[in-house]
Image (cartoon, rainbow, N blue to C red):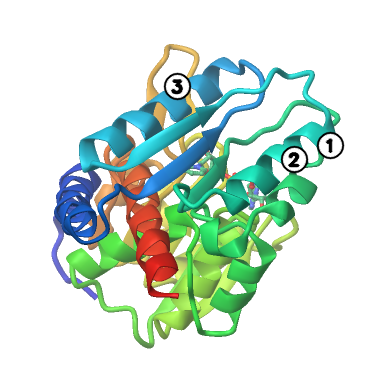
């Protein structure tokens, strides 16, 4: 991989801005053709402050791209039946191309059951088992936004993936697992690490591509990184003093990596950009059906 001593900092903010501008252009074409904007229903159950920030950012990004968002904010006391009825309504609403249910849901509601109820064609988060299954079967449809964003970054910087050894640290349904499937699809030889992995240092050290999705501040020291490797840090951790850091020791890893994402400004901004891209994609597919 890259032999440079100076890593290329992967500018997720700039790439995300390009993706968003491209989506906005294609949304204008969609409106001209179909006489309506693509629509995203955003469901936020309860008033979790962190969720409110995410939801506000998503709606703002939609507005900037010309995508219409529809807000649904049931109280935390909403029943399982009421929430399923709302999802059913949105599944059948012809103005709605994408449905996003902001997680986490309040205790007592089963997120899996709610997500499973979303029409897979409108599942712009890509979390529905149908979409995960399609990705696993090498026929991706709507792809989970965070891993998809990492792939888009890798593509923009022409990072060689075919035949590369990739190690994904973290095996969650929303990041680690779909990330491994994406890298496999791109031709990597993929290792997935988690809490029971025996020798994490060795698994990271032999990787040409490292994706960290753990949620533990600076858990991966720079010394583990193979010289020239591409490092994608998906982790977002807030330290006691308020600073945001990733799962990788950025300063240390920068001394060895060929490419590296900063936190913030790396993988993070790509996630919303890919959500907009997925919403447009869902709208285009729906109109073509
Ligand atoms: P999660 O808690 O669901 O999963 C964490 C994974 O890390 C688990 O599979 C666990 O086995 C593994 N892990 C934990 N400790 C480990 C250890 N010591 N060694 C090896 N593996 C270990 O978290 P998640 O939802 O996948 O999120 C991971 C991180 O990514 C978090 O910091 C989250 O904030 C961030 N995130 C960022 C975005 C984005 O937009 N950039 C999106 C989603 C999540």
- Residue 18 in percent (x, y) is at 15, 51
- Mark carried by residue 85: 2
Residue 197's label in the rendered image is: none
CA distance separating discs 2 and 3:
26 Å
Per the rendering, the mark at residue 53 is: 3
Contact between labelled residues 3 and 2, with CB atoms less than 8 Å apart: no
Contact check, label 1 and label 3, Cβ < 8 Å: no
Q: Is mark 1 within 8 Å of ligand 1?
A: no
**Horizontal arrangement in the rendering, residue 118 relative to residue 163 (left or right):** right
* Rendered position, 181 above or below 274: below
Left or right for 22, reference 70: left
Give the residue displayed 65% in from the left and 44% down from the top.
Answer: 89
> Mark 1 packing: few (<14 Cα in 10 Å), some, or many (20+)?
few
Q: Residue furthest front?
A: 35
Q: Position of residue 32 (x, y in %)?
A: 17, 56
Query: Depth-wise, is mark 2 or mark 3 nearer the camera?
Result: 2
Asked whether residue 146 appears in the rendered view, the answer is yes
Quarter of the N terminus within the rendering: bottom left
User: x, y percentage for residue 9?
Assistant: 19, 50
Residue 129 position by quadrant: bottom right
x and y, in percent, of residue 146 in the image: 44, 52
């Amino acid at each position: 991989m890259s032999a440079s001593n100076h890593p290329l900092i992967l500018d997720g903010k700039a790439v995300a801005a390009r993706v968003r501008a491209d989506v906005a252009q294609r949304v204008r074409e969609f409106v001209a053709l179909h006489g309506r904007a693509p629509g995203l229903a955003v469901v936020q159950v309860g008033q979790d402050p962190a969720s409110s920030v995410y939801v506000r950012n998503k709606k703002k990004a939609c507005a900037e791209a010309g995508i219409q968002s529809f807000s649904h904010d049931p109280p935390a006391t909403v029943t399982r039946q009421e929430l399923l009825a709302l999802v059913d309504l949105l599944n059948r609403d012809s103005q709605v191309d994408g449905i996003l249910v902001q997680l986490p849901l309040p205790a007592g509601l089963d997120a899996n059951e709610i997500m499973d109820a979303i029409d897979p064609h409108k599942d712009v988060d890509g979390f529905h088992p149908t979409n995960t299954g399609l990705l696993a079967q090498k026929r991706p449809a709507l792809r989970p936004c965070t891993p998809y964003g990492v792939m888009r970054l890798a593509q923009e910087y022409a990072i060689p993936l075919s035949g590369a050894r990739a190690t994904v640290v973290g095996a969650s349904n929303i990041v680690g697992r779909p990330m491994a499937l994406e890298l496999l699809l791109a031709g990597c030889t993929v290792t997935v690490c988690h809490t029971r992995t025996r020798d994490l240092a060795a698994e990271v050290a032999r990787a040409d591509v490292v994706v960290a999705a753990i949620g533990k501040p600076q858990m991966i020291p720079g010394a583990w990184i193979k010289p020239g490797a591409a490092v994608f840090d998906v982790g977002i951790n807030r330290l006691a003093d308020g600073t945001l850091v990733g799962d990788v020791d950025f300063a240390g890893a920068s001394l060895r990596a060929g490419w590296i994402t900063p936190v913030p400004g790396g993988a993070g901004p790509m996630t919303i950009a890919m959500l907009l891209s997925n919403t447009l994609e869902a709208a285009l597919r729906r109109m073509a059906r």
